[in-house]
Image (tube, helix red, strand yellow):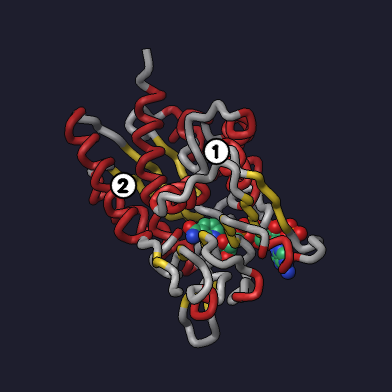
């Protein structure tokens, strides 16, 4: 039987509507600073989408488009300025940064209270112990998509392919917090297909087009495809071979229109959370 398609676009639109309604209801004056260094075309698209989402939700966006030759010192100075700016509630530095800039150093310079990506070590640590203010946007978006299916995570076999700090690892933690039995796979995993076939909930965050094939998927599984891969013909495609897996899974996210829009909706939600944290008595 064909899988139900999880409509990330519609779910993200409803999250943004909720955020907008909350901002209007409470009359919040919220600002998000987005910093982009260099002219990576994919980063440019993400930054523009974030700007559009801010407009829709009623969040002021402050964009800092810096040339590729910006020094690390200059970028750190900008982060310091934004940390001190009361109009700016969230700071997002678009990754990747040019090679001469130490990403880790820049992330650690962002105030944890303005770290709407939840990449700062303080926020990462808080996710680990389950006492978090911000959730990283992509894994948080994946959780919303899983919740939308009505499938309970508790007690389920959950397999995450990928162990990056921004997707795979936090995704595994969020599933664990909801009492999933979690396996994290990576490039050294043995019997990957077999492990994946045990998954009631399968999250693919590999970065390889059509990596997950139908023989790796259990009948009726929830399949969340985080991958964004550009094919030679210019088309976007996920990590999951959609045509065949959608014949076997119970629920599946498309690419585009699945996890991508959710990431941005979660960023909007985190920016409101940031405002609230900064205005706590
Ligand atoms: P990384 O490259 O940092 O991580 C990829 C992971 O996949 C690594 O852990 C790697 O293992 C694992 N991997 C690679 N090859 C294999 C293999 N043959 N078998 C098993 N595991 C393998 O990527 P990210 O986590 O940053 O991103 C993953 C994908 O998600 C990308 O396509 C990215 O574009 C997309 N993405 C989408 C977002 C969205 O909003 N939709 C947001 C962020 C990312 P190892 O650690 O052993 O090298």
Residue visible at 47% across and 69% down in the picture:
41
Outermost residue to the bottom: 233
Q: Quadrant of the C terminus?
A: top left
Crowding at mark 1 (Cα within 10 Å: few <14, some 14-19, many 20+)? some
Q: Quadrant of residue 258?
A: bottom left
Q: Residue at x 47, y 65 (%)?
A: 252
Q: Horizontal placement of 232 versus 56: left or right?
A: right
Residue at image position (50%, 39%) is 135
Indicate left or right for 7 with 234 as reference: left
Residue drawn at (23%, 50%) of the image: 56
Please name whichever residue, 162 or 67, is drawn nearer the observer in this view of the structure.
162
| Front residue of 136 and 47 | 136
Comes first in the chain, label 2 or label 1:
2
Residue behind label 2 places its C-beta within 8 angstroms of ligand 1? no
The answer to whether one can see residue 120 in this image is: no
Residue 97 rendering spot, x and y as whole percentages = 58, 55
As drawn, is 9 to the left or to the right of 227?
A: left
Q: Nearer the viewer, mark 2 or mark 1?
A: 1
- Give the labeled residue for mark 2: 15
- Give the secondary structure at mark 1: loop
88 is higher (above) or lower (below) than 55: above
Residue 185 visible in image:
yes
Q: Which residue is mark 1?
A: 178
How many numbered marks, from 0 up?
2
x, y percentage for residue 30? 29, 35
Foreground of the two, 63 or 199:
199
Q: Is residue 222 above or below residue 81?
A: below
């Amino acid at each position: 039987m064909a899988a139900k398609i999880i409509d990330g676009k519609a779910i993200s639109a409803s999250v943004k509507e909720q955020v907008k309604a909350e901002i209007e209801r409470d009359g919040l004056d919220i600002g998000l600073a987005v910093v982009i260094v260099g002219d990576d075309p994919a980063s440019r698209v993400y930054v523009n989408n974030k700007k559009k989402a801010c407009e829709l939700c009623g969040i002021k966006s402050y964009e800092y488009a810096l040339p590729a030759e910006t020094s690390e010192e200059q970028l750190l100075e900008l982060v310091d300025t934004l940390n001190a700016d009361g109009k700016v509630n969230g700071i997002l530095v678009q990754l990747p940064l040019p090679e001469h800039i130490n990403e880790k150093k820049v992330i650690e310079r962002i105030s944890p209270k303005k770290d709407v990506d939840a990449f700062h070590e303080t926020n990462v640590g808080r996710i680990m112990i389950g006492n978090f203010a911000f959730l990283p946007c992509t894994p948080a978006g994946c959780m919303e998509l899983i919740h939308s299916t009505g499938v309970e995570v508790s007690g389920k076999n959950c397999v995450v392919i990928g162990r990056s700090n921004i997707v795979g690892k936090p995704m595994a933690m969020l599933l664990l917090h909801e009492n999933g039995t979690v396996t994290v796979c990576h490039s050294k995993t043995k019997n990957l297909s077999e492990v994946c076939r045990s998954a009631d909930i399968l999250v693919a965050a590999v970065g390889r087009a059509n990596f997950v094939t139908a023989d790796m998927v259990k009948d009726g599984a929830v399949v969340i495809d985080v991958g964004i891969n550009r094919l030679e013909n210019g088309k976007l495609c996920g990590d999951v071979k959609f045509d065949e897996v959608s014949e076997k899974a119970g629920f599946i996210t498309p690419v585009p229109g699945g996890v991508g829009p959710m990431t941005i909706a979660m960023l909007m939600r985190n920016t409101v959370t940031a405002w609230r944290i900064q205005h706590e008595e």
